[in-house]
């Protein structure tokens, strides 16, 4: 029996780390928060939707990435820890299978319960797969890689708003979506800077290998600033979220003169993002409390 349990336990451990548990909240929170504010409910859809974006969605996103990026990950010193799993080839087939099967019941329910928002759900699940899957490989198409990565986090929020039948073309809503998207683009772009050397060695294209470490860092900094400015136009209390962008600007600014040769020092800033995301989540949580108690525009 011990021999039978060991492979299952090891497979579970591999899948767990491949799903990047430290990042689960980054996709579940936008969905849950948007749905709660838009509907005022914590019903079955809220819980199942939040659970889907918490675990299955992340396993699909990062698991596929670990499988198809294995060769380049071998050359990347960051892989094998909190910043990304180094998934043995032994578990590649299991990961793709588990990621796909785990998503099916959740997707079936979400589509059945909210068919009017099914296209949005399909779009964002597609971008998750297209980012890493062979042939499509959006992650190797400069600029599109950052936009696609941003959609992974903005998508759950947009989907929740669509389910709640919120007008996505409302100027205030568009400002929030735009600001969140710019934040996602900036985070991906700066994250790609530290991998310029490893990606070029593996012949992988990215926004950072295309523009170079210095230009990409400056683009990321500009996007963070623009994100903070744009969210101000959403009106109170959303405008207070501009505070959440300031620490990111402070972290990226010191790398203004980074070069391709020194690209790996950007990891010092990138590692701070893991904890800055929790600070940003705290700020947004406070805003949600205000929004639910006093109304979105105060």
Image (cartoon, rainbow, N blue to C red):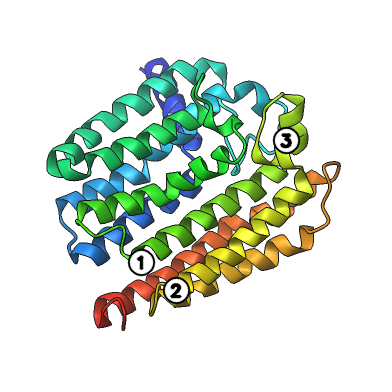
Residue 47, position as x, y percentages in the image: 23, 51
- Residue at image point 46% right, 44% down: 21
Contact (CB < 8 A) between labels 1 and 2?
A: yes
Residue 11 position, x and y percent, is: 44, 25
265 up-or-down from 7: above or below? below
Q: Quadrant of the N terminus?
A: top left
Determine crowd level at label 2: few under 14, some 14-19, many 20+ residues with C-alpha closer than 10 A. Answer: some
- Which is in the foreground here, disc 3 or disc 2? 2
Q: Earlier in the sequence, mark 1 or mark 2?
A: 1
Furthest residue in direction right, as rendered: 261
Left or right: 194 in relation to 81: right
In the rendered image, which quarter contains the C terminus?
bottom left
Residue picked out by circle 1: 171
The one of 5 and 34 positioned closer to us in this rendering: 34
Residue on which disc 2 sits: 233
For marks 1 and 2, give the CA distance. 9 Å
């Amino acid at each position: 029996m011990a021999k039978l349990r060991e492979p299952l336990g090891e497979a579970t451990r591999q899948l767990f780390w491949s799903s990047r548990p430290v990042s689960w909240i980054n996709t579940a929170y936008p969905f849950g928060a948007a749905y709660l504010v838009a509907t005022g409910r914590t019903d079955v859809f809220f819980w199942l939707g939040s659970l889907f974006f918490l675990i299955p969605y992340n396993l699909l996103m990062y698991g596929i990435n670990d499988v198809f990026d294995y060769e380049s990950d071998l050359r990347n010193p960051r892989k094998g820890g909190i910043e990304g799993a180094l998934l043995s080839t032994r578990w590649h087939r299991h990961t793709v299978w588990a990621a796909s099967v785990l998503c099916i019941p959740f997707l079936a329910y979400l589509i059945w319960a909210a068919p009017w928002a099914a296209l949005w759900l399909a779009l964002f699940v597609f971008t998750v797969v297209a980012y890493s899957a062979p042939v499509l490989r959006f992650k190797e198409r400069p600029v599109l890689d950052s936009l696609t990565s941003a959609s992974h986090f903005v998508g759950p929020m947009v989907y929740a708003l669509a389910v709640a039948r919120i007008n996505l073309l409302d100027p205030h809503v568009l400002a929030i979506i735009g600001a969140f998207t710019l934040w996602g683009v900036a985070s991906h772009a700066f994250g790609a800077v530290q991998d310029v050397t490893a990606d070029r060695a593996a012949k992988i294209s990215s926004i950072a290998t295309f523009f170079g470490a210095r230009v990409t860092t400056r683009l990321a900094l500009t996007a963070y600033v623009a994100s903070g400015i744009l969210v101000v136009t959403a009106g109170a209390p959303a405008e207070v979220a501009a505070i959440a962008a300031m620490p990111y600007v402070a972290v990226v600014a010191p790398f203004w003169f980074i070069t391709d040769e020194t690209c790996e020092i950007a990891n010092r800033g990138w590692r701070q993002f893991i904890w800055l995301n929790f600070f940003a989540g705290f700020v947004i949580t406070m805003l949600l409390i205000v929004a639910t108690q006093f109304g979105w525009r105060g």
